[in-house]
Image (cartoon, rainbow, N blue to C red):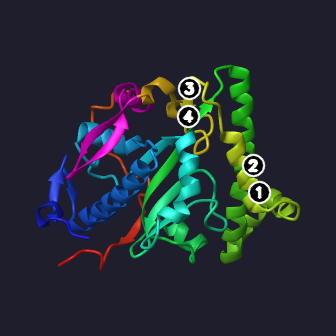
Amino acid sequence: MKVSEEFLKEEVRCDYTVTTEFKKLWAVQMDILERFAQVCEKHGLRYFAAGGTLLGAIRHKGYIPWDDDIDVQMLEEDYYKLCEIAPEEFQEPFFFQSWQTEKDARPYFSRLRRSDTKACTREEMEIDPDRNKGVFIDIFAMSGVPDNRLAYGFKMFRLKFLRQIINGNKFDRLMKRASGKQKLKYRLDPRRITWSVLKHFVSFRKLSDHYVKVSRGKPKNTLVAASAFRPGDKKLTWKREDYAECIDLPFEYTTIKGPGNYDSVLRQQYGDYMTPKKGGAYHSDLIFNTDGVFEK
C-alpha cells in the first residue's frame, strides 16, 4: 500500500504527539476501511462511523489524536448479511474475524483484519497466541431494543447472564496458561466454573449462536443499541431515526460514512462532545507492527 510521506510525518495534535509509527497504524486501518466500504457498497449495505471514530470525524476531521482504532456499526439487518458474505468477499490479506469464522471468538462484535500486519493487546497475546492478530477495524451490530421497560430489562438480563457464561470460556483458557496465584484466581472464578460444567452439554459455538439470537431485535423497534457488545448501556442506545440518513464525513485523507443526525448520536454517548477530554485509547496496551506493507 502507498501513503503520502506528508501524512506519515510525526506531528503534534491537541498537545499530543502522533508518531510516524502511529500514523502507519492509522493508514493500514484506513486501507482496511476502504476494502470494507467497497464490499458494503457492492452489496447495498450501510455502515456508520461509531464511538471515538465518529467523534474524531466530527471534531478533528479524522482520528482523535490518541485513538488507536476505527469503529463502525451497522443496523443488524445489514450486519448479519455482512457476516454471511464476508468469508467469500474478504480474501487475503484480509480476514473477517467473528464467532462464525474463528474458534472461541466471542459473539459481541466482529473485526476485519489485515493478516500481513499485527495489532493485539497483551491479554490477547496471552490467551490466544494462535489467533489472527492483524491490524483491524471493529464492526458492531445495532439491534432493535424494546420500548417497554419490562421487556427491555428482561432482554438485557438474559444477555448479561449469557455473557458471563461466555466469558467463562476465556477464563478457562487463561487458567491453562497461568501459574501460581493467577491460576488459582481463574480456577475459582464462578464464570469459569459455570462454563466448565456447561461445556459438557453445549458447544461454545452454539452458546454464541444463542447469544446472537437473543441480542437481535425487530425492525419496528424505535430504539437501536449496541446491546450485543455492551448490554444495558443507555449511552449506547439511540433513536433508529438518527440513522435514517447516511452521509459522507471527512476523515484524514479520505471519507467515512456517518449518521445524518450525528449530533443526537454523539450527545447521547458523550454529552458535550465538542470539548476535548484527553484520555487513553480503548486498546491502551496495543502492540502493533506494520512493517512490510508500505511501498518505498
Residue 37 percent location from the top left of the image: 38, 52
Residue linked to disc 1: 206
Name the side, left or right, on which 295 lies relative to 206. left
For marks 4 and 2, the one nearer the N-term is 2
Identify the amino acid type marked 4: Ala
- From the image, state whether disc 4 or disc 1 is nearer to you: 1
Contact flag, marks 4 and 3 (Cβ < 8 Å): yes
Residue linked to disc 4: 225
Image quadrant for the C terminus?
Answer: bottom left
The local crowd at label 3, few if under 14, some if 14 to 19, many if 20 or more residues have their Cα within 10 Å, is many
**Distance CA(mark 4)–CA(mark 1):** 23 Å
Residue linked to disc 3: 223
Residue 51 percent location from the top left of the image: 41, 41
Q: Residue at x 55, y 34 (%)?
A: 225
Q: Is residue 240 magenta?
A: no
Contact flag, marks 3 and 1 (Cβ < 8 Å): no
Please determine whether, in this image, residue 16 is positioned above or below residue 54: below
- Look at the image and give the residue range highlighted in magenta: 245-270
For marks 4 and 1, the one nearer the N-term is 1
Please determine whether, in this image, residue 199 is positioned above or below residue 224: below
Q: Quadrant of residue 119?
A: bottom left
Contact flag, marks 1 and 2 (Cβ < 8 Å): yes
The local crowd at label 2, few if under 14, some if 14 to 19, many if 20 or more residues have their Cα within 10 Å, is some
Q: Residue at x 51, y 34 (%)?
A: 236
Identify the amino acid type marked 1: Lys
Identify the amino acid type marked 3: Leu
Residue linked to disc 2: 210
Q: Residue at x 43, y 26 (%)?
A: 242
